[in-house]
């Protein structure tokens, strides 16, 4: 069954908190049986304006900018599409899922997450019919392993206290219980006495359960301590929350010590079940991690960062630690945008956004793979445009990967019919994440040192705040067209398109009455040599990550704003009307050098994970 015949069939299951549990086994089965899986995320924003990315970022700087500027936003929809290759029939069996996720705190001890929204991103998602009601009302909760551990320890302490106050517990002592009864503040004595009278009347009645009036946390604490001290062997209490998030105490009778113990065990089991529910979508990420399967994404750096940050551990400050963390938790990654933008595939393609790439790959010289769906795929209205729904985007990403992988096989001698995820033809792409808008460093290499290109044609320039792009163009006019990257109001990087002119720039310019030019390498050397003390004294940034962004200005002082609403739609930037030149090609051979193992620096989350 070919993909082009499935345009109006249901493709993915939309999963919310209400049906997460019942679908979890199917998700687990799909992940464990697949040959590879594709992912995609939808976010409430992409980047803060104070951390603008540019063409002369280093991989470490790009990571720091995204870590500081993008992680304040929230991933609210996570798409997964699994692909299982049937060798006998030469086809892929696929299952796709869209999960709405939202960090709803299940109790007062749980993290209460603050996050940003970017208006352009929200507007874009609304235009794509994204359902925010499902996110905020029905989103699946999740917890970091560290938060789960803290909540579990808090539950254990709570249960220990409950056991000590339980009449059926071996450690229970009525005299000590009475002795430890706290003193009631004068302003609350009447309130507590009134509650105790109600409990006493309830105890004599035929009722089995009574709900007290809602009150604040301190009042509930006084009720627990004093009522339990007066009625240690006859009643039990627990706090419930209604559908309006109002908390109140429920009092129930115990018929015997055995009945009290049974209710205590039921309460403990209920608490752990609620904690397990709160872990929620994090279970799916753990399944993916533990499977060791190849995870495919399109322009997937942000997807990876958000996945780590929201479901595994806050992103580390250290760049090498981030690379080690990624390799530990997501050991095999592949970015289809990197595949598409490198030879030999680049020679057959013009556009690299996910939607355009998908369209191109449906015509010659590419061959659409044979994709089938299980008969039990849930019904979903698929008649409209679905791009930017995470489950569908994950499906399209996986489809593009299979098509491009098979093309790589077709140009081999002799040709290979089907290229599977473990093929040597793909090893040059594995664990290399595409870097958008950096022409000479195409990727972050998670397994080896990052590429180090020559930037001898790039210069750091200081100038008066009144300068505009036209002034820099005039200054460098003897050397041809230039690429300008503004750092702040008085500095910028300038790159030459005619790289052979680089050696003449410093002799001709260097320093004028109102400007100062140094090489890119000298600029990097200066900021690298700065110690923390020198940084404080001179207030000099260690990189342009700490610099405010300079806005390009025309002669009329107008500002041209570049609002990028979704990462994969942003192609390599154009400068001075010319398309940015291509950078280094990928070395498809295995390299002996590997990055230093930083696993010992990763902290306690490794054991929890």
Image (spheres, grey):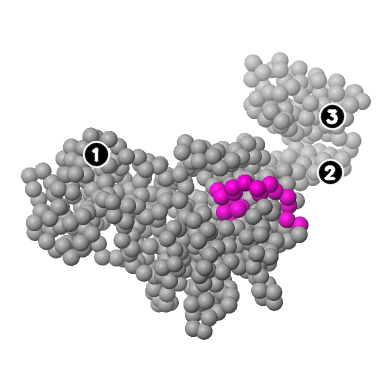
Front residue of 6 and 464: 6
Do the residues bearing badges 1 and 3 touch, measured as CB atoms within 8 Å? no
Q: Which residue is mark 1?
A: 554
Residue at coordinates 80% horizontally, 19% vertically from top-left? 197
Q: Which label lies toward us, 2 or 1?
A: 1
Res 246 seen here? yes
Instruction: Choose the circle earlier in sequence order: 3 or 2.
Output: 3
Q: Which residue is mark 3?
A: 209
| Disc sitting over residue 262 in the figure | 2
Do the residues bearing badges 2 and 1 touch, measured as CB atoms within 8 Å? no
Q: Look at the numbered disc 2 and give the secondary structure of its residue.
A: helix
> How far is disc 1 from disc 3 in space, using C-alphas?
74 Å
Residue 117, placed above or below residue 9: above
Q: Look at the numbered disc 1 and give the secondary structure of its residue.
A: loop
Residue 3: image location, x then y, percent: 63, 61
Residue 39: image location, x then y, percent: 57, 57
Instruction: Choose the circle earlier in sequence order: 2 or 1.
Output: 2
Residue at coordinates 13% horizontally, 58% vertically from top-left? 505
Residue extending farthest to the right is 206
Q: Quadrant of residue 539?
A: top left
Q: Look at the numbered disc 3 and give the secondary structure of its residue.
A: strand
- Boundaries of the magenta span: 376-394
Residue at coordinates 58% horizontally, 66% vertically from top-left? 368
> How far is disc 3 from disc 2 in space, using C-alphas?
16 Å
Residue 246, placed above or below residue 273: above
Residue 156: image location, x then y, percent: 68, 46
Instruction: Choose the circle earlier in sequence order: 1 or 3.
Output: 3
């Amino acid at each position: 069954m070919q993909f082009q015949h499935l345009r109006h069939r249901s493709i993915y299951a939309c999963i919310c908190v209400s049906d997460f549990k019942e679908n979890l086994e199917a998700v687990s089965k799909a992940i464990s049986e697949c040959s590879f899986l594709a992912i995609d995320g939808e976010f409430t924003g992409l980047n803060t304006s104070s951390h603008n990315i540019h063409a002369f970022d280093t991989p470490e700087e790009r990571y720091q900018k995204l870590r500081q500027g993008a992680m304040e936003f929230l991933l609210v929809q996570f798409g997964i599409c699994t692909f299982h290759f049937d060798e006998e029939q030469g086809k892929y069996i696929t299952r796709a899922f869209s999960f709405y996720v939202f960090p709803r705190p299940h109790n007062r001890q749980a993290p209460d997450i603050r996050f940003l929204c970017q208006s352009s991103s929200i507007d874009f998602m609304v235009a794509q019919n994204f359902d925010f009601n499902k996110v905020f009302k029905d989103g699946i909760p999740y917890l970091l392993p560290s938060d789960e551990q803290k909540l579990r320890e808090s539950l254990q302490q709570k249960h220990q206290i409950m056991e000590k106050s339980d009449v059926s517990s071996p450690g229970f002592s009525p005299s000590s219980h009475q002795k430890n009864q706290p003193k009631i503040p004068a302003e609350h004595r009447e309130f507590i006495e009134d509650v105790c009278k109600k409990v006493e009347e309830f105890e004599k009645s035929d009722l089995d359960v009574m709900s007290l009036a809602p009150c604040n946390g301190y009042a509930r604490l006084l009720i627990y301590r004093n009522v339990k001290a007066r009625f240690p062997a006859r009643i039990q209490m627990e706090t419930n929350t209604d559908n309006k998030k109002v908390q109140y105490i429920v009092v129930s009778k115990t018929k015997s010590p055995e009945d009290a113990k049974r209710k205590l065990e039921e309460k403990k089991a209920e608490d752990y079940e609620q904690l397990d529910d709160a872990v929620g979508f994090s279970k799916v990420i753990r399944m993916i991690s533990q499977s060791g399967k190849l995870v495919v994404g399109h322009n997937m750096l942000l997807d990876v960062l958000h996945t780590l940050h929201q479901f595994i551990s806050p992103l580390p400050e250290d760049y090498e630690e981030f690379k080690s963390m990624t390799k530990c938790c997501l050991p095999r990654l592949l970015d289809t945008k990197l595949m598409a933008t490198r030879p030999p595939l680049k020679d057959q393609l013009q556009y690299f956004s996910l939607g355009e790439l998908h369209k191109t790959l449906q015509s010659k010289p590419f061959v659409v793979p044979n994709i089938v769906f299980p008969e039990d795929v849930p019904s979903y209205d698929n008649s409209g445009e679905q791009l930017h729904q995470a489950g569908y985007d994950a499906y399209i990403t996986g489809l593009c990967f299979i098509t491009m992988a098979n093309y790589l096989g077709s140009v081999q001698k002799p040709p290979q019919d089907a290229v599977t995820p473990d093929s040597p033809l793909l090893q040059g792409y594995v664990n290399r994440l595409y870097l958008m808008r950096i022409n000479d460093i195409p990727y972050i290499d998670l397994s080896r040192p990052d590429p180090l290109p020559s930037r001898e044609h790039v210069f750091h320039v200081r100038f008066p705040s009144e300068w505009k792009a036209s002034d820099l163009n005039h200054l460098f006019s003897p050397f041809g067209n230039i690429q300008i990257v503004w750092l702040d109001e008085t500095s910028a990087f300038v790159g030459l398109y005619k790289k052979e002119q680089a050696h003449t720039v410093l002799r001709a310019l260097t320093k004028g009455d109102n400007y100062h030019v140094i090489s890119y390498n000298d600029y990097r050397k200066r900021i690298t040599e700065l110690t923390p003390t020198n940084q404080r004294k001179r207030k000099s940034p260690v990189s342009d990550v700490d610099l405010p962004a300079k806005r390009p200005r025309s002669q009329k002082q107008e500002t041209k704003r570049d609002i990028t609403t979704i990462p994969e739609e942003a192609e390599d930037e154009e400068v001075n009307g010319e398309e940015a030149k291509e950078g280094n090609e990928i070395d498809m051979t295995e390299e002996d050098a590997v990055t230093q193992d930083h696993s010992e620096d990763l902290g306690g989350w490794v054991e929890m994970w």
